[in-house]
Image: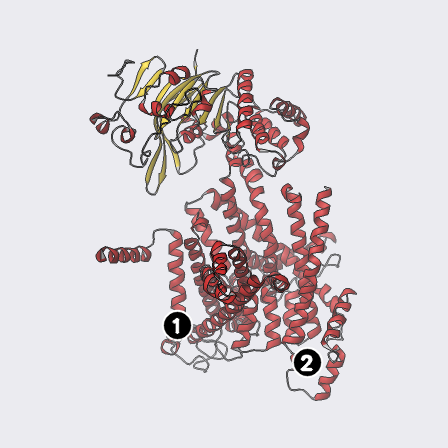
Amino acid sequence: MASLRVYVIRRVLVAIPMIFILLGIVFFIMRVVGDPVSAILGGHAPQEQIERIKEQLGLNKPILFQFFDYLGQLLRGDLGRSLIWGQRPVISEIWDHFPATLELSICAFLVSILVGIFTGIIAATNFGRFFDHAFRLYGIITYGLFIPWIGIMLQLIFGVYLGVLPIGGRIGTLMEPETITGLYVLDSLLTLNMESFISAIRHLILPSLTLGIYLSGIYTRLTRTHLIEVLNKDFIKSAWARGLPKRTVIFKHALKNAFIPILTMMGLQFALLLVGAVLTEITFSWPGMGTLLFERITYRDFTTVQGIIVFFALIVITVSLLVDVIYAYIDPRIRY
Amino acid sequence: MKYSISRFIVSNIIKNIFPRKGTEYFVLVGFILVLLIILMAIFAPFIAPYDPIKKVGEILERPSGKFLLGTDGLGRDVLSRIIFGARTAVLVTFLAVSISLSFGVLLGLLSGYTGGKFDTVFSLVMDAMYSFPGLILAIVLAAMLGPGILNTAMAIAVIYTPTYFRMVRGLVLSLKESLFVEAARAIGAKDRTIVFKYIFPNVISSIPIVLSLNAADAVLTLAALSFLGLGLPAPTPDWGFDLRAGHAYLASRIWWPSTFPGLMIVILTLGFSLLGEGLNEILNPELRR
Amino acid sequence: MKNLLTIQDLRVYYYLREGAVRAVDGVSFFMKRGETVGLVGESGSGKSTLGLSILKLVSSPGKIVSGKILFNGNDIAGWNEKKMRLLRGSRISMVFQDPMTSLNPLMRIEEHLVETIRTHQKIPKAEAKKKASLLLNEVGIPPERGGDYPHQFSGGMRQRIGIALAIALNPDLLIADEFTSSLDVIVQFQILNLMKKLKASHQMGLIFISHDISLVSEIADRIALMYAGQIVEFAPADIFFSEPLHPYSEGLLNSVPNIELSDQKLNYIPGMPPDLVRPPDGCRFYPRCPYGEDICRRKEPPLVQIEKEHMVKCFRYDGKKSRT
């Protein structure tokens, strides 16, 4: 396992310049592409107000100083203070909203993986027959679906007409469980609060389905392609020839090998999961990072918006690091 | 001889209009969907029954003979708005894809051919942009740039520039070492000549697939930006914006102002992705399974 | 002695859009317990398909159309998947051509062996592990390397592992498809010797599929020569090499370089094998045959028995060994 450790350290070192470049891009967009002052004040504001905002954000210093100020702050874990609502630190705004996004993303991810891998296996094992064509089409169609539209259709059917599920929010009013992890489903289970648990689950179903269906098509396609490729390999023929049961051949031998490229794609698709979560949250008034971003853009809360973007950048880098490590752990060939 | 060639061409056209394989149907259906929406955009004033930005009936009228798809919250005809909305979608998508294509290809050729430090820095920046969630980048850019057709198109174009950059740079690097470029250099061709006369034509053949897949994605990104109110200023007919406006009436069982604009987004995206997928399988037969 | 394997009029077709490819078209042969049959033919002659169809592992769009596969007296052609699965790897097993790809890259080699043993024998894991190291030892792999992954072994060693997997359950019949052809000559020789040794100690029947007739001559007791989906000559090896009857056999043996007859002219057989979607009406070898007559073009020759265990598919032999 020593080689695995070396691999991980090397991979972390590669991630560092990436972090700086991404932070630089965010800085560039926020200060150079647009004018933060007019973005905050809307273009025509009195001169003294402009000066006050500039002073407050440190925008009257030379641009290079501003960049180092910004990096210095970030290294201390300080994302600045919000421009509205009693100027709360941005980092606490983020920590308040992140668990909601995490909860939604995990559920949607599970839905997409389960649906995607299941349909992919059926398509690959029925290669060239009806189910293969049907699920290939499913893969293409789901990728072209617009998340808010799927959400609205589900809201219409299950929320408005059938009336069986709530169409927005994260939990019933005044039913929030005691905060332990910030994930309502988990917290209500831990505090044995069944009422909250059921409410949390009911609120989760439609948003998770919306995002999950959208993402599942990608996994259908990936599973199908890679499984077909692996099933044609000699070691699978050899597994059949040794009389192994179908279950073992497909799941243990074929799927595990097909899973390696799928895993790599999962890392790349993570950005898509975040993007999808932002749109899903806004469609379902889900109080997560996406809703926060949307709300603060509308309120022109420049520092919070910048903080959220930096936070997203860091998550993306962390996840891609994590995926590479899992990859190395599963595939013995990569470690050498 | 002439006869047989023309017959060969005709029979090939017929074969392509009535394809036998599933993937060829994908291209055909995708092409028809995209073509229909482009025609809709061009001839919008002749097709649309009403002025899309005028109040022409009561607010929120159900679909009827008078208003085939009903009216929206401001008493405007939903059908006319989605027909004119095709103009916004097609125009912004076209602009966004053209901008990202030209920048991406140009920078990719430059970076790949020059090499060295310039290339290293550029590739790192492009990789960072590529790995970042595209829509979030576009949201921030759109918010900073403000509304408008060109601004929205630019915000979307930024997401796709790295795709072309990476693709073109990769191809240039592999072609740079190939024999025919070596040969051109040996007979004293200038660098610029080499890039545009020898490398560029080789690169361009793989672009149409990426182009239509990106167009599909761009339609979705535009819809998302307008859904968030960051696209074109009201009252421009815009599917994403109308979807958002119609969403507000959902709880009162008023489904038509949101369902139809959303459906148009899905149809156009589907058209582009079917086209891209199909082209991919036809142009890269080694991927065909 | 009873036959280990008897194949009667076996037909295996691949159904493509262009039509049915008759990869195996009316093949019959037999072998006794512990014998080696060299199944020889050029690429595309259907020999690999024949090998796979004995295990009933021909994959879609291929299908066994008709014929009998008698293994230990039972016609397994009619058996279902469940019964076949118990046979595969335990009574009949297979070694594949490319050792680089025939092992699962994500599994330790010991796990391969343990999995195979425990699929067919309900024994505890520890016991299976003990058996696995004995097997590795038997094929010349240090048992302590059982915990390594396939990519840590060379091609020749991987093929030894492949053989260990195939003999793990003492099968009655081993099918080896070009199992040495991706190795270099010296390793090829070592692996072939290992196979001879194991065959004797385990008393296995072996079907050795190869395009390399000189390699086959090293090990085979009987030769079955395939051409265009059919067996054109089936004979005891010594008879085949000393007195080949079929014009194709003759041509093939003349095209092998022989050190002892160094001034001999090296021959080759002109022409190409026929299209197996629409094979010619008459003899399939007719277009390339130096002795072709009118009848060969019109009628398919029958498989005639020359002696008790010697058959040839040619009009030139009419139940006698002499040429008519």
Which amino acid, mark 1? Met
- Looking at the image, which is closer to me, C14 or A159? C14
Residue B136 vs residue A183, the one in the foreground:
B136
Answer with the quarter of the image where residue A87 lies: bottom right
Q: Is residue C4 visible?
A: no
Q: Quadrant of residue B248?
A: bottom right
Residue B56 sits in quarter: bottom left
**Res A200 seen here:** yes
Say few, some or many: other residues with alpha carbon within 10 Å of mark 1 (under 14 / 14 to 19 / 20 or more): many
Q: x, y (%) of residue C266?
A: 37, 27
On the rendered structure, is C140 left or right of C224?
Answer: right
Q: Secondary structure at mark 1?
A: helix
Image coords of residue B1 (percent x, y): 22, 55
Give how far across and how far down residue A73 sits, in percent. 77, 68
- Mark 2 is on which residue type? Val
Please rate how many residues cluster around mark 2, counting C-alpha atoms within 10 Å: few if below 14, some from 14 to 19, many from 20.
many
Q: Which residue is mark 1?
A: B40
Q: Position of residue C88 (x, y in %)?
A: 50, 27
Q: Which residue is under mark 2?
A: A37
Q: Is residue C217 above or below residue C22?
A: above
In this rendering, position of residue B120 left or right of residue B189: right
